[in-house]
Image (cartoon, grey):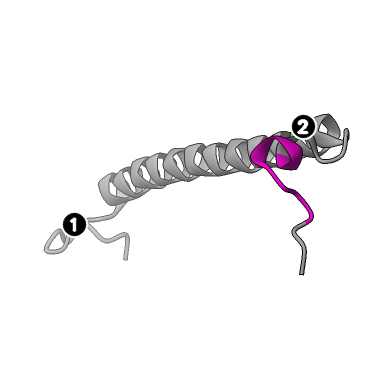
Amino acid sequence: MQPYFYSISEFIAMGDHGVFVWSCWAIAVGMVLIFVGYSRKQRRTLIKELTIQQARQAQRAPKKGNKTSAL
């Protein structure tokens, strides 16, 4: 069995298609990293908004032991 590439420089060149192959890899990896970063930012924002919403709801809720019912 013979190797397809005999050196690292041949592997990087990919038979004169290296520029296209490696640029596609770079774009794909970049897009995945951007997506991960965006998702993490969205998650942090959502958690912050939910915490604020829960705090507001806790302030509005009638306290136990308070008998000021409208009945």
Q: Residue sitting at 28 percent across and 50 percent down?
A: 58
Relative to the observer, which residue lies in front, 23 or 50? Answer: 23
Q: Is residue 17 magenta?
A: no
Decide: few, some or many residues near mark 2? Use Cα within 10 Å; few <14, some 14-19, many ≥20: few
Residue 15 pos. (x, y %): 87, 39
Range of magenta residues: 4-11
Q: Quadrant of residue 30?
A: top right
Q: Is residue 9 magenta?
A: yes
Q: Nearer the viewer, mark 1 or mark 2?
A: 2
Label 1 amino acid?
Answer: Lys
Residue under label 1: 63
How many angstroms separate mark 1 from mark 2 (CA)?
61 Å
67 versus 40 height, above or below: below
Q: Quadrant of the C terminus?
A: bottom left
- As helix, strand or loop, the secondary structure at mark 1 comes to loop
Q: Residue furthest left?
A: 65
Position of 62 compared to 56: left or right? left
Residue 2 pos. (x, y %): 77, 63
Residue under label 2: 23
Position of 25 compared to 64: left or right? right
Q: Residue sitting at 85 percent across and 33 percent down?
A: 20
Q: Quadrant of residue 12?
A: top right
29 versus 57 height, above or below: above
Q: Residue sitting at 47 percent across and 44 percent down?
A: 46
